[in-house]
Image (cartoon, coloured by chain):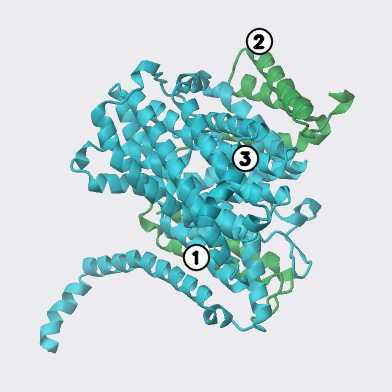
C-alpha cells in the first residue's frame, strides 16, 4: 500500500509537469471533439493522431493518446443526448434515455449526470487499475507461449460471446482479422506470405489503415448520403443542473456502472461498448419502474455512461500488465507504445516506473480536465455539429487519408484504408460487427508465434497446452464460453423438434416403453 | 429465398477457398511442425466452416432486397475519391490531391457553389498541410512545382 502511494507520488510528479499536463489537456480537448463528431470514434481518432505523437517523448505521447481516448468517451455522450447520434459505439445506450430526456427539456441534467457519472467512474476505476495492474503483472511473469496462446484464444472467444450480435458472425470476423494478420513475412521461416508484389506488405497490414477504414471511412460511406440532418438542441448553462430526485436516482446506477464497467473492461473484448449495454440491462432489471426506460429515465443515462468510462481504465489493465490488448483501441495504443520503443507487459512496471505511474497519474488529471471541459463547454462543442454534414465529411475524409498516410508515409496504406472502408460498409450493411477484425489482426502474429513456439517447446506435442495449469484453466474457461454459446443452438434445435412434433411423439411413446 | 446471411456466408466461403488456393505455393509443414502455410490454411478452414454455417442457418435472415441502397451513389463517389488519394498522393503531392478531392466532393457530389467549394478546398488543403507538415513536422509528399 505504502509502496503504491510512493509510486503514485512519482507518477504525479511526472503527470503534473507542465509539458505532460499540456498534452493531457490537448488530448482531452481533441478527444472530446472526436467524440462529438459522428463518424470519428475514439479508435479512428487515436489512429489519425498517432503520427502526431511520433515526435513526442514516450510519456507525453501515451498521455496524449489516453486523453483522446477519455475525451472521446465523454464527447460521445453529448451528441447522443442532444441529437440521438452516438459519437461512438459505446454511447448507443445513452441515446435512448438521454435523447428522451432532451425531448422533455431535461437535456442539461442528462449531460450533467453523464459528465459527473463519467468523472466518478473514471476516477474510481483508475484506483482499481493502480492496485490491480502491478500484482497482475507479477503473476504474468509465469506466462510462457502456451499460456499466452490460451489467453489470446480466450480473449477472442469472450469478444465474440459478449458482442451484441450473432456469435457465429463475430467469430467469423475474428477469423477474417486473423487471416489479414497472416499477410507479410513469416517471422519463423522468413517466407513472404500473400504479398502480390507489394514490398510494403512485408511487415503485414497495419492496424491504423484497417481501423480507420473499417470505422471512420465506412461510417462516412453510410452517413454521407442521408438526406435529413438531425436537429441540434443547445442547452443553456443554467439548465444543466439536475434536480435532487435525479441525483438520488443516479447514485446507485453510477456505483453499479463503475464496478461493472471496470470488471468488463479487464476482460478482452470491446469492453467499453459491451459494458454500456450490460449496465443498461442491469439498471432496467433492477428498476422498480422498468417502463420508464426509453421514456427518459435518468438511470438509463447514469449507468451506461459510468460503465463505459470505467471500462476505459479497466481495458488498460491487461494491456499494461500483460501486454495483451483487450480490444481494438488498446491495440492501437499498444502499437503507439511500441513505436516509442516501449514493450507493455510484465516488465514495464519494473523497468519504466515513471512511464507507468505517470500514465496512471495522468488519468486522474485527465478526469478532472474532462469534468471542467464537459460541463461549461458543452454548448461550444455542440457548435461543431452546426456545420452541415455535406461540408463536414469531406474534411473528415481528408483527415482519414492524412492520418493513414502519415503513419508509414505509404500510399499502399491509403489503398488498404479504401479497401477496408468498402469492406466495412458492406459488412455493416449485412449486419456484421467489424471490431473483431481489428482485434484479430492485432492478435494474429502473437497467436501464431505462441502456437508455433509452444509446439517447438514440446517437440510437436499438443498436450503442452493441457499439462500446464494456467493454460489448462484458461482453455477450460474458453470451452465454457463455447458451450454457453452452443446452448442457444440446442434451444433452437429443441424448438425445431417441437415444431415438427418430434418431442411430443417421444413423450407419448415413453409411458408405453416403461 | 436470397437472404443477407446466405449471401454473406457464401462470400465468406469463397474468400476462404481463395485463401486455401493461394496458400498452395507455401510449405504447409506437418501437424507437429507447422510451416508458414499451416496457420492461414487452418484459419481459412475455420472461416469456411463458419461461412457454411452462416449460409446454412441464414434462411430466416432479412431478405437481400431489404438492404437500403439509398446512399450508394454517395458511397461510390467517396470511395472513388479515397482511391484517387491513394493513387495521386505521391504523384501530385498532398496539397493538389486534397484540393482535387475536396473540389470533386463539394462541387460534383454535394453541388455546392463555386465560391464555397474553392474557399473550403483551399483552406483545408493548405491549412492542414501547414498544420501537419510545417508545425507538427509530419512528412507529407510535395508535388510538381513544389506544391
Task: Please tell me the colour of chain B.
Answer: green
Gap between marks 2 and 3 measured at Cα: 52 Å
Secondary structure found at label 1: helix
Residue visible at 59% across and 40% down? A12
Q: Is residue B48 visible?
A: no
In the rendered image, which quarter is residue A26 located in?
Answer: top right
Which class describes the residues within 10 Å of circle 2: few (<14), some (14-19), or many (20+)?
few
Chain ID, mark 3: A
Q: Is residue B29 visible?
A: yes
Residue nearest the viewer, comparing A215 with A117: A117
Task: Please tell me the colour of chain A.
Answer: cyan
**Dot 3 and dot 1 residues touching (CB under 8 Å):** no
Image location of residue B55, percent across then percent down:
45, 60
| Residue with the mark numbered 2 | B115
Quick one: which residue is furthest to the front in this view? A2
Chain ID, mark 1: A
Q: Is residue A374 left or right of residue B142?
A: left
Gap between marks 1 and 2 measured at Cα: 56 Å
Amino acid at each position: 500500500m505504502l509502496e503504491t502511494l510512493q509510486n503514485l507520488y512519482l507518477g504525479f510528479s511526472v503527470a503534473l509537469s507542465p509539458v505532460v499536463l499540456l498534452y493531457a489537456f490537448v488530448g482531452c480537448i481533441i478527444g472530446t471533439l472526436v467524440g462529438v463528431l459522428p463518424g470519428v470514434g475514439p479508435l479512428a481518432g487515436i489512429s489519425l493522431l498517432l503520427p502526431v505523437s511520433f515526435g513526442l517523448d514516450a510519456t507525453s505521447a501515451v498521455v496524449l493518446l489516453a486523453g483522446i481516448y477519455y475525451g472521446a468517451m465523454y464527447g460521445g455522450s453529448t451528441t447522443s443526448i442532444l441529437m440521438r447520434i452516438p459519437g461512438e459505439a459505446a454511447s448507443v445506450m445513452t441515446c435512448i434515455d438521454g435523447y428522451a430526456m432532451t425531448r422533455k427539456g431535461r437535456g442539461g441534467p442528462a449531460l450533467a449526470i453523464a459528465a459527473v457519472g463519467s468523472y466518478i467512474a473514471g476516477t474510481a476505476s483508475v484506483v482499481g487499475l493502480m492496485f490491480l495492474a502491478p500484482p497482475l503483472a507479477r503473476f504474468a511473469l509465469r506466462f510462457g507461449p502456451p499460456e499466452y496462446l490460451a489467453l489470446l484464444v480466450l480473449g477472442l472467444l469472450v469478444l465474440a460471446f459478449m458482442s451484441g450480435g450473432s456469435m457465429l458472425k463475430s467469430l467469423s470476423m475474428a477469423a477474417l482479422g486473423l487471416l489479414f494478420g497472416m499477410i507479410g513475412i513469416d517471422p519463423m521461416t522468413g517466407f513472404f506470405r500473400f504479398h502480390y508484389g507489394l514490398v510494403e506488405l512485408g511487415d503485414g497490414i497495419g492496424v491504423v489503415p484497417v481501423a480507420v477504414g473499417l470505422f471512420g471511412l465506412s461510417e462516412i460511406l453510410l452517413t454521407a448520403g442521408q438526406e435529413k440532418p438531425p436537429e441540434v438542441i443547445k442547452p443553456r448553462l443554467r439548465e444543466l443542473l439536475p434536480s435532487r430526485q435525479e441525483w438520488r436516482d443516479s447514485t446507485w446506477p453510477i456505483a453499479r456502472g463503475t464496478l461493472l464497467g471496470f470488471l468488463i473492461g479487464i476482460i478482452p473484448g470491446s469492453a467499453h461498448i459491451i459494458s454500456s449495454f450490460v449496465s443498461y440491462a442491469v439498471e432496467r432489471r433492477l428498476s422498480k419502474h422498468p417502463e420508464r426506460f426509453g421514456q427518459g429515465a435518468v438511470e438509463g443515462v447514469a449507468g451506461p455512461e459510468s460503465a463505459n468510462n470505467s471500462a476505459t481504465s479497466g481495458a488498460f489493465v491487461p494491456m499494461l500488465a500483460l501486454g495483451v490488448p483487450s480490444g481494438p483501441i488498446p491495440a492501437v495504443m499498444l502499437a503507439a507504445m511500441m513505436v516509442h520503443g516501449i514493450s507493455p507487459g510484465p516488465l514495464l512496471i519494473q523497468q519504466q516506473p515513471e512511464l507507468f505511474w505517470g500514465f496512471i497519474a495522468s488519468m486522474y488529471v485527465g478526469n478532472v480536465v474532462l469534468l471542467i471541459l464537459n460541463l461549461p463547454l458543452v454548448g461550444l462543442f455542440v457548435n461543431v455539429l452546426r456545420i452541415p454534414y455535406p461540408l463536414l465529411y469531406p474534411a473528415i475524409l481528408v483527415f482519414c487519408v492524412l492520418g493513414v498516410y502519415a503513419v508509414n508515409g505509404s500510399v499502399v496504406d491509403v489503398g488498404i484504408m479504401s479497401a477496408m472502408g468498402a469492406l466495412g460498409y458492406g459488412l455493416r450493411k449485412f449486419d456484421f460487427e467489424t471490431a473483431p477484425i481489428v482485434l484479430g489482426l492485432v492478435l494474429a502474429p502473437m497467436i501464431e508465434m505462441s502456437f508455433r513456439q509452444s509446439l517447438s517447446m514440446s517437440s510437436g506435442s499438443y498436450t503442452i497446452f493441457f499439462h500446464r495449469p494456467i493454460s489448462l484453466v484458461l482453455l477450460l474457461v474458453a470451452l465454457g464460453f463455447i458451450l454457453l454459446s452452443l446452448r442457444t443452438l440446442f434451444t433452437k434445435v429443441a424448438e425445431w423438434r417441437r415444431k415438427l412434433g418430434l418431442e411430443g411423439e417421444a413423450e407419448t411413446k415413453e409411458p408405453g416403453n416403461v | 429465398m436470397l437472404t443477407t446471411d446466405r449471401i454473406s456466408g457464401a462470400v465468406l466461403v469463397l474468400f476462404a477457398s481463395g485463401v486455401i488456393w493461394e496458400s498452395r505455393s507455401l510449405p504447409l509443414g506437418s501437424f507437429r511442425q507447422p510451416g508458414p502455410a499451416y496457420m492461414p490454411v487452418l484459419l481459412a478452414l475455420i472461416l469456411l466452416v463458419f461461412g457454411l454455417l452462416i449460409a446454412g442457418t441464414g434462411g430466416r435472415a432479412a431478405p437481400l432486397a431489404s438492404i437500403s441502397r439509398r446512399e450508394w451513389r454517395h458511397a461510390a463517389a467517396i470511395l472513388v475519391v479515397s482511391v484517387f488519394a491513394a493513387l495521386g498522393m505521391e504523384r501530385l503531392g498532398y496539397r493538389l490531391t486534397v484540393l482535387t478531392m475536396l473540389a470533386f466532393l463539394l462541387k460534383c457530389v454535394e453541388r455546392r457553389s463555386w465560391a464555397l467549394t474553392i474557399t473550403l478546398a483551399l483552406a483545408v488543403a493548405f491549412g492542414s498541410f501547414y498544420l501537419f507538415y510545417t508545425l507538427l513536422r509530419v512528412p507529407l509528399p510535395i508535388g510538381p512545382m513544389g506544391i
